[in-house]
């Protein structure tokens, strides 16, 4: 695992620690990387990012969302929504088990 991703803004590459990213959100032809206080854009798709970050703490929870499980505040299993750093992220029915398997759940 690399401790850095580089996002290009204009002609400048900005170094970002993947641990600081809360989630990636697909938005048409680009994907947003949302951090607690930053936002970056990439032309990589969610599936490509998921493969790129396969050994990190990211789980695809929806076709449009790749989530850093270390940034989760709470999960409402009934409404299939995740609260992550003040944002609400949906969980798709087909991806819910992937998320639950990635978590350490205390019963």
Image: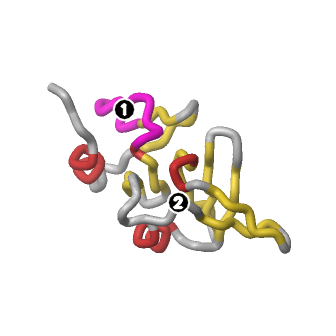
Q: Residue at x 27, y 55 (%)?
A: 94
Residue 18 x %, y %? 54, 55
Identify the image quadrant of the N terminus. bottom left
Quarter of the picture holding the C terminus: top left
Residue in the image at 61% along x and 63% along y: 31
Q: Which residues are magenta?
A: 70-81
The type of colouring in the image is secondary structure
Seen from the viewer's position, the closer of residues 11 and 100 is 11
Say left or right for 101 vs 14. left
Residue 74 falls within the magenta-colored stretch: yes
Return the residue at label 2.
Answer: 3
Check disc 1: other Cα within 10 Å, few if <14, some if 14-19, many if 20+: some
Count the labels in the image.
2
How far apart in space, not on screen, are marks 1 and 2 (Cα)?
27 Å
Name which residue lies at 19% across and 28% down: 106
Choose top left, top right, bottom left or bottom right for residue 56. Answer: bottom left
Q: Residue at x 24, y 44 (%)?
A: 100
Queried whether the magenta region covers residue 59, the answer comes back as no
Q: Is residue 92 left or right of residue 84?
A: left
Q: Secondary structure at mark 1?
A: strand
71 horizontally vs 10: left or right: left
Q: Is residue 39 above or below residue 106?
A: below
Question: Is residue 21 shown left or right of residue 68?
Answer: right
User: Measured from the top left, where is residue 101 in percent x and y?
Assistant: 21, 48
Above or below residue 105? Residue 50 is: below
Of badges 1 and 2, the one in the foreground is: 2
Q: Which mark is residue 75?
A: 1
């Amino acid at each position: 695992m690399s401790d850095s991703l580089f996002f290009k803004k204009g002609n400048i590459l900005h170094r970002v620690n993947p641990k600081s990213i809360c989630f990636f959100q697909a938005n048409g032809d680009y994907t947003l990387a949302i951090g607690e206080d930053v936002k970056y854009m990439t032309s990589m798709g969610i599936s490509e990012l998921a493969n790129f970050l396969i050994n990190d703490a990211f789980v695809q929870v929806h076709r449009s969302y790749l989530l850093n499980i270390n940034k989760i505040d709470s999960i409402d299993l009934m409404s299939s929504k995740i609260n992550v750093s003040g944002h609400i992220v949906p969980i798709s029915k087909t991806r819910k088990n992937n998320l639950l398997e990635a978590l350490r759940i205390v019963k």
